């Protein structure tokens, strides 16, 4: 499989050498493109020797010829745009982001970016202030909105001597993102996936609510990944600070009751439900009409909300896969398995939220994908990558069903892992 690695100008350019090696270990044939700035940091010869291909350094470079197509130099960007299966831009400098966002075509990378229909993966690296600047953030948002997968930079010591976000993501994270877009292209085509995300809010009075720490990132990543893999996606979202994923039907809700109604209304026709939302288990029995005043101790009387997940299982149509989430702080495995059995779902994505740095509000997460008969360990990775792994596991559950449909089997139970 042939992909393109575009290296832009920045001190992290040397890390692209390691990235190239990491991509090659996944049997990817990598064509390297370097901007002028990149060549000031690393010699093209390094990449040429390691990739086994001449490095493309400019639009007007007389020496470059697409080896496969024999394209003339002037048409090189078109030939590569058509033959490459992914365009990875790493490190992406602040300037290159700005140029790509503007659609400039006065260098090879800009032309290639506009001319290709292949998925684009961008791993930025720069000084923290440059990264945080609204101009850069706007460029990132625009590129993401146009379909690029952004592998966000890490936090840590920067080459400029400052601390903060701006370090190029680890090669393993970039490789994961590349494999994510390459291998799963359309395997969810034909599925209608209903995903819930975010944390519901239960009003106490006109200004206060009972909420939780869910950021919605996991659910949104799942929605994006499912959409990218060809599914029709309905995202029922409790309040989050996240941008709506492109191409998904987003249904905003606030309370657990609203989420239940929104989900139930959309169950017909849904083939897969993933309940990643953190749904309130209790709500105030009564919402105060006026703002509650401070006057000594206050007792709120709460009543349980409906368990949406358990109710979905009761209502599900044949073939519908139902996946729950479980955030546990103790006896994680046993609690997860008990929940799986109690709720009657096909699988539970089990999170140990007592672990630091992952889970709530974090960009990374680790989980165990638990079915009645299996437990797949999904080690710490970005939520984006984890979303793809989870969907991969879900599709494992689907496979026997599809096989039976293809072979015309009339076995009544088509959900082998249902507890
Ligand atoms: N869930 C739901 N409706 C609720 C509460 C939770 O559908 N009212 C779903 C969550 O979206 C998640 C799963 O149930 O997919 C497990 O949520 P969790 O809060 O961990 O479990 P609980 O049912 O609350 O069980 P417990 O309180 O025993 O942990």
Image (cartoon, helix red, strand yellow):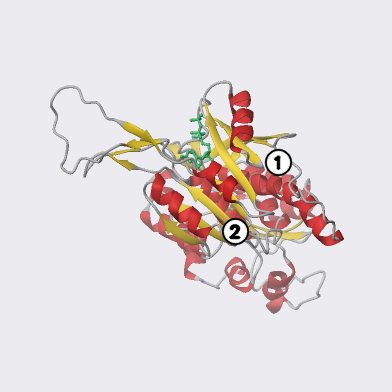
Q: Is residue 166 above or below residue 301?
A: below
Q: SS for tag 1? A: loop
Rendered location of residue 53, percent (x, y): 78, 59
Q: SS for tag 2? A: loop
Q: Is residue 106 left or right of residue 30?
A: left
Contact between marks 1 and 2 (CB within 8 A): the answer is no
**Mark positioned earlier in the residue sequence (1 or 2):** 2
* Residue plotted at (46% across, 40% down): 278
Q: Is residue 128 left or right of residue 54?
A: left
Rendered location of residue 360, percent (x, y): 47, 36
Label 1 to label 2: alpha-carbon separation: 18 Å
Rendered location of residue 144, percent (x, y): 51, 59
For label 1, being within 8 Å of ligand 1 is answered: no
How crowded is the residue under tag 2: few (<14 C-alpha within 10 Å), some, or many (20+)? many
Q: Is residue 334 left or right of residue 130?
A: right
Where on the picture, by quarter, is residue 256? top left
Q: Which residue is mark 1?
A: 418
Q: Which residue is mark 2?
A: 270
């Amino acid at each position: 499989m042939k992909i393109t690695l575009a290296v832009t100008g920045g001190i992290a350019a040397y890390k692209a050498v390691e990235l190239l090696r990491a991509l090659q270990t996944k049997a990817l044939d990598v064509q390297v493109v370097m901007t002028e700035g990149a060549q000031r940091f690393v010699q093209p010869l390094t990449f040429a020797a390691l990739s086994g291909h001449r490095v493309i350094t400019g639009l007007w470079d007389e020496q470059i010829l697409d080896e496969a197509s024999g394209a003339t130099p002037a048409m090189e960007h078109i030939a590569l745009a058509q033959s490459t299966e992914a365009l990875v831009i790493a490190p992406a400098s602040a300037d290159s982001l700005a140029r790509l966002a503007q659609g400039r075509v006065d260098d090879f990378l800009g032309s290639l970016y506009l001319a290709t229909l292949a998925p684009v993966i961008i791993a930025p690296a720069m000084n923290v202030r440059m990264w945080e600047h609204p101009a850069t953030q706007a460029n990132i948002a625009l590129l993401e909105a146009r379909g690029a997968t952004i592998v966000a930079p890490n936090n840590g010591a920067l080459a400029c001597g400052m601390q903060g976000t701006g370090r190029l993501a680890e090669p393993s994270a970039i490789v994961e993102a590349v494999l994510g877009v390459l291998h799963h292209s359309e395997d969810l085509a034909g599925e209608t996936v209903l995903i819930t995300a975010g944390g519901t809010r239960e009003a106490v009075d006109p200004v206060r609510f009972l909420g939780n720490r869910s950021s919605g990132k996991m659910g949104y990543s799942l929605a994006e990944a499912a959409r990218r893999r060809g599914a029709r996606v309905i995202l029922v979202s409790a309040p989050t600070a996240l941008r709506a994923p492109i191409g998904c039907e987003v249904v905003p809700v606030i309370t657990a009751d609203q989420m239940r109604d929104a989900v139930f209304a959309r169950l017909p026709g849904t083939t897969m439900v993933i309940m990643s939302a953190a749904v309130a288990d209790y709500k105030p029995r009564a919402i105060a009409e006026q703002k509650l005043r401070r006057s000594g101790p206050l007792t709120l009387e709460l009543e349980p909300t409906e368990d949406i997940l358990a109710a979905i299982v009761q209502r599900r149509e044949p073939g519908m896969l139902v996946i729950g989430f479980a955030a546990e702080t103790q006896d994680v495995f046993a609690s997860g398995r008990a929940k799986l059995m109690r709720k009657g779902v096909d699988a539970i994505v089990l999170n140990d939220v007592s672990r630091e740095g992952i889970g709530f509000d974090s960009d990374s997460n680790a989980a165990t994908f638990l079915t009645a008969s299996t437990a797949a360990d999904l080690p710490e990775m970005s939520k984006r990558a984890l979303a793809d792994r989870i969907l991969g596991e879900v599709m494992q559950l689907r496979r026997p069903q599809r096989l039976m449909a293809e072979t015309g089997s009339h076995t009544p139970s088509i959900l082998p892992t249902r507890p």
